Image (cartoon, rainbow, N blue to C red):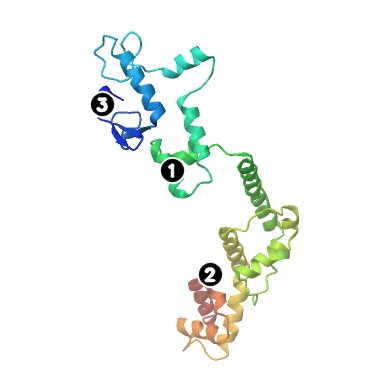
Amino acid sequence: MTKTERVHRKHEGTKSVVTVAKHKTGDREPATLVFGEHEEGQLQRYYHLRERVTTDATEFFITNQGKRMTKIYDDVNKSFSVNVSAGMFRKMIETRSRGHDKATSSNVARALQHSEDTALRYYQLPDTGEAIQRQRDIEAVDHTALFEIAVMKEFDELFPCVPYTKLTDEVVIDKLRGSEAYDQFPIAMFSEKFIGKIKSTFAQKTFKDRVDVLYDLCRAEYDNTNINKYAVIDTAKRKNMSYFMQIDRERMIKETLKKFNK
């Protein structure tokens, strides 16, 4: 904050507002400093003392030698035998803003010249409840990884290779909840990606048997002179077996047609 910026402060009721253009994170926007009546009185008192010092410094705060003040916390820590820093105060303020509405948290972050993301990643300290929840989340991630490995080991028992089985997301989740793996890792999460992996693995394991089923159904109505891609699709649809082709559809149709040429 310079003397000029201080002189051009604005007043709003009992508060004064100083706009500081040059500061540590000035690439974002000018910083605004808001002072109440007490702080304003202290600044005025300091200013009268500052005027007694002969200096060319343009900064508002200077040392006794008339030089720019750069290590104010070093002087405070030395004078009062404490250990404080700007970062400490930033953390305290950001942490206190936790639990308020989004607009409030956003304004606090902006006042400290941080993005909301920066505030969340670096300046908000977790309280006890959040620390416990974070640990639970970490454990859930670990359990999920081990759970998925265990499921794949007992895959054939959980999902027997019966070609007519329609493996929906609901069926998969129900099977997972009843698995030994889930008994062992009860806080594991069922991710969409893992459910998809199970359905894909099941489709691969039942692929050949499903091709045989489609071939037998098509052969009842077609031969190698009139069978085609659309006939296979239509047959699967009429027989309520379109789910056979939800994964790797083109390959299944191709293999079914091949069997007519043998």
Q: Earlier in the sequence, mark 3 or mark 2?
A: 3
Quarter of the picture containing the N terminus is: top left
Q: Earlier in the sequence, mark 2 or mark 1?
A: 1
Residue displayed at 60% across by 68% down:
169
Quadrant assignment, res 240: bottom right
Q: CA distance from mark 2 to mark 1?
A: 42 Å
- What kind of residue is marked 1? Glu
Q: Earlier in the sequence, mark 3 or mark 1?
A: 3
**Between 67 and 225, which is closer to the camera in this rendering?**
67
- Placement of 46 over or under 234, stated as above or below: above
Quadrant assignment, res 69: top left
SS label for mark 3: helix
Residue 238 picture location, percent across and down: 54, 87
Quarter of the picture containing the C terminus is: bottom right
Q: CA distance from mark 3 to mark 2?
A: 72 Å
Tags 3 and 1 touching, CB below 8 Å: no
Closest to the camera, between mark 2 and mark 1, is 1
Q: Residues within 10 Å of mark 2 (few under 14, many from 20)?
A: some
What residue is disc 3 on? 7
Q: Disc number at residue 213?
A: none
What residue is disc 2 on? 247
- What kind of residue is marked 2? Ile
Q: Residues within 10 Å of mark 3 (few under 14, many from 20)?
A: few
SS label for mark 2: loop
Residue 155 picture location, percent across and down: 69, 61
On screen, residue 93 versus residue 183, left or right, reads left
On screen, residue 69 versus residue 118, left or right, reads left
What residue is disc 1 on? 116
- What kind of residue is marked 3? Val
Q: Residues within 10 Å of mark 1 (few under 14, many from 20)?
A: some
